[in-house]
Image (cartoon, grey):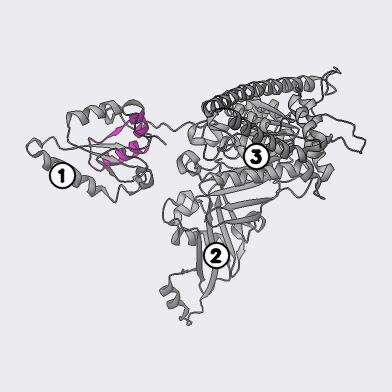
Amino acid sequence: MLQFLWNFDHELHFYSVCKLCSFYNMQLTLEFGGGLELLCNSVKIHNVNVELQNGAEKLTMKDLLSWIRTNLIKERPEMFMKGDTVRPGVLALVNDCDWELSGQLDTTLEEKDVVVFISTLHGG
Amino acid sequence: MSEMTRLPLASETSTKAAKRRALRPSLPYLKSSLLGSAFTLWDCYCDCDSMDHGGGEASAILRQLEDLKASKSEIERQISALEARFQEIALQQPNGSVSNGSCPPTIPSVGSGYGHDLSPQMIYRYSRHLLLPSFGVQGQSKLLKSSILVVGAGGLGSPVLLYLAASGVGRLGVVDHDVVELNNMHRQIIHTESFIGQPKVKSAAAACHSINSTIQVVEYQEPLRTSNALEIMSKYDIIVDATDNAPSRYMINDCCVVLGKPLVSGAAVGLEGQLTVFNYNGGPCYRCLFPTPPPTTACQRCSDAGVLGVVPGVIGCLQALEAIKIASAVGEPLSERMLLFDALSGRIRNVKIRGQSPQCVVCGVKAPFSKQQFQEFDYENFTHSPLTPLPLKLNLLQPDSRINSKEYKEKLVSGEAHVLVDVRPEHHFKIVSLPNSLNIPLSRLEARLPEITSALKEKEDQRGTDSGSGGQVYVICRRGNDSQRAVQYLQKMGFTSAKDIIGGLEGWAHEVDPNVPTY
Ligand SMILES: [Zn+2]
């Protein structure tokens, strides 16, 4: 199945030299806004390496969401997700484009993609 | 040559129309000559009279000025009220106008003979708009004939209203039920200190009129509801959502869909803002994008999360821009796109959003929302939050687990051994706190429980002999909600006699010590 790693230097190094098992690393930029960053230690931009294991041919938004939930969300995951998708009021954007236009959970991600999650604001 | 002749002309005029006539031919010169005359005035008093006399004269003039300004704004208010009334009557007529030749139309059409109906004053006032090749006479004429409703005269609404008034939108409506407060001033820049305690719509209309006395401003000093929204919004071409809560946003959107009005929607909290145009030219509506309302816990409010004043200012300016673009039919309105503003990094992202959704329960082609459906829809129930947000008042605890601030004051006076835990976030605690309180933010309570235990122990040790009863724990927060959550948790963890202070620090400030600042 899928196995991932992220951008802790030592881990990255460890996996990068491990060529034996033909891992495929996908570099992505993830951004959180509208308050969602509070769920990931108040850090808005995360440069991550998401790893697909041998056998998996692609990375979808569905895969990415479960990776984020496991690896990035530090508290109150219900503020980010509901079921296997984002909660109501969260916009997901792949390369500045609403994921609704690219297939939502089935959107296939590519190297260097920028994925943004924004919680809609109501204040004024 | 003409300085001598022009000045008396300008100062002698009594009616507005006459004033405009006088200003028309030579405004650029007049500006400098007025300045000149002001200096002459002061010079004269300093030269001819003693300082005392001069000071007395000056203050008499100032008083007179104040009086005149007061009567001017009163007259403007009356004009505005009459114009609004006239507009209402005009709208009730089938042909949209009143058959009374003596009433001036809202936008004076001065058959200029230049192929447009801009009067000389309008040409001069809006000259920089007219000089824009892509805007020009055509754009300005459309703007002058347009009507725009701004819902909310707060942080977003302030710049929206100021710019729309300045740019010459023919009729500007403003809806707000609230009054101006001191803690609004840092971002709601349309209001001035002299209007504190007065209705925001009154303050906003006065500001708009002082910028542009030639436009009509209509005040709606009431909350927007399903019962009045259709009637109010139907009188305008474009709606600007400058509100601060989720149910209002759904309600305004749905009403725009029902009436077929474009909606310029902006929001700002903390250091971020969002902007888009809904229901424009076949584009999506708010519900296409957000069919299900978010959980109430995800709806941050400025009064809780804070907001940097200039952030709604930036978004409000952009809302005014979008409204002007739609009204003048210039440029590409931000439909099917959303602008995301991040103040801290100084970045603006412009993203593409989905189009109109055929499945949308409001604008979907299959079953569009009817006026009746709109009027019967319960927006507060739908979003689980009130249309006119009041501070949340939870009631989680049994009465014997709570004390009010006066009772706590008695405990303090009697010297009861206790620990006061303040569960607000650290940056709140830094604003103001009660003496001898222990700050443990609610989110850290679990991890820092031992601190309460040791603080209690310390109190008992200080007391020495009269231990046994054990120390009491009181919990305080800003308004008395988080303190109840904390007490619930503490009681579960064995601090069975823990009590919360009803109403929090705000209650304390109101009932015990008015010198404690509120925020
Ligand atoms: Zn819709």
Give the class, few, some or many, for how many residues have Cα within 10 Å of label 1's Cα (few <14, many ≥20).
Answer: some
Residue B103 image position (x, y, % from top left)? 82, 19
Of tags 1 and 2, the one toward the viewer is 1
Residue designated by label 2: A29
Which of the 4 image quadrants contains residue A107?
A: bottom right
The quarter of the rendering in which ligand 1 is drawn is: top right
Residue designated by label 1: B458
* Residue B354 seen in render: yes
Of tags 2 and 3, the one toward the viewer is 3
Q: Secondary structure at mark 3?
A: helix
Residue B12 image position (x, y, % from top left)? 75, 24
Give the amino acid at mark 1.
Answer: Glu
Residue A35 painted magenta: no
What chain is tagged by disc 2?
A
What chain is tagged by disc 3?
B
Residue designated by label 3: B160
Q: Residue furthest left?
A: B465
In this picture, residue B245 sits left or right of residue B113: left
Give the class, few, some or many, for how many residues have Cα within 10 Å of label 3's Cα (few <14, many ≥20).
Answer: many
First along the sequence among labels 1 and 3: 3
Give the amino acid at mark 2.
Answer: Thr
| Mark 2 CB within 8 Å of ligand 1 | no
Report the span colored magenta.
Answer: B480-509
> Could you tell me how far apart the alpha carbons at marks 1 and 3 are, in whole angstroms?
57 Å
